[in-house]
Amino acid sequence: MSEALWIVDIDGTLALRGDRGPYDWERVGEDLPNPPVVTIVRALISAGHPIAYVSGRIERTRRRTERWLRTHVGHFDSAEGLWLRPNGDRRPDTVWKAEVYREHFAGREVAGVIEDRVGVVRMWRSLGLTVLQVADGNH
């Protein structure tokens, strides 16, 4: 029996962008790991939980983001994968992430979500999901 899925956000949750601007996509590889969240994600992986990384980053950051995950989390499970916003998609994260959930995870057992932004946390909770909110704010 496989364990329940966890959905994990990247920017502001697993990765801290420091002085990188929120849309400075060329510099995503410079982001710093958020140590407590990295520890939680590694523990979930060790316990057998599949991880789905669902990020508002755009598709063109895929290689840099996968490299960052391998370097800082030590894991990237392509079977579960990494969901990135299509290039040019400017819809709010709440809309895009809810769509990803409906299309890919609605029929699965989801143990929880790790997220930072208040509005996105509210959206996940409105879908009946448990959310671990790792930061305050709606940046």
Image (tube, helix red, strand yellow):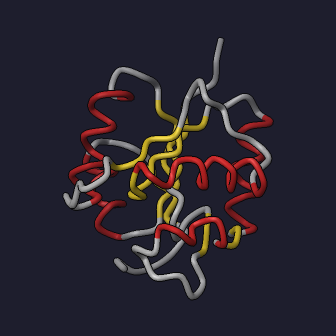
- Position of residue 77 relative to residue 39, above or below, is above
Q: Which quarter of the figure has residue 75? A: top right
Identify the image quadrant of the C terminus: bottom left
Q: Which of 36 and 58 is in front in this view?
A: 58
- Position of residue 4 relative to residue 2, above or below, is below
Q: Nearer the viewer, residue 10 or 61?
A: 61
Q: Which quarter of the figure has residue 24? A: bottom left
Residue in view at x 21 percent, y 61 percent:
90
Residue in view at x 47 percent, y 33 percent:
110
- What is the total number of numbered labels drawn onto the structure image? 0
Q: Is residue 90 left or right of residue 54?
A: left
Q: Which quarter of the figure has residue 134? A: bottom right
- Position of residue 30 relative to residue 9, above or below, is below
Q: In this view, does 11 lie to the left or right of 67?
A: left
- The percent coordinates of residue 54 (x first, y second) are 45, 47
Q: Nearer the viewer, residue 111 or 88?
A: 88
Q: Nearer the viewer, residue 35 or 33?
A: 33
Identify the image quadrant of the N terminus: top right
- Position of residue 13 relative to residue 45, above or below, is below
- The percent coordinates of residue 135 (x first, y second) are 51, 75
Q: In this view, does 109 lie to the left or right of 98?
A: right
- The percent coordinates of residue 50 (x first, y second) are 62, 31
Q: Is residue 131 left or right of residue 34?
A: left
Residue in view at x 28 percent, y 43 percent:
127
Residue in view at x 73 percent, y 66 percent:
36
In the displayed orientation, state which residue is furthest to the top.
Answer: 1
- The percent coordinates of residue 27 (x first, y second) are 57, 72
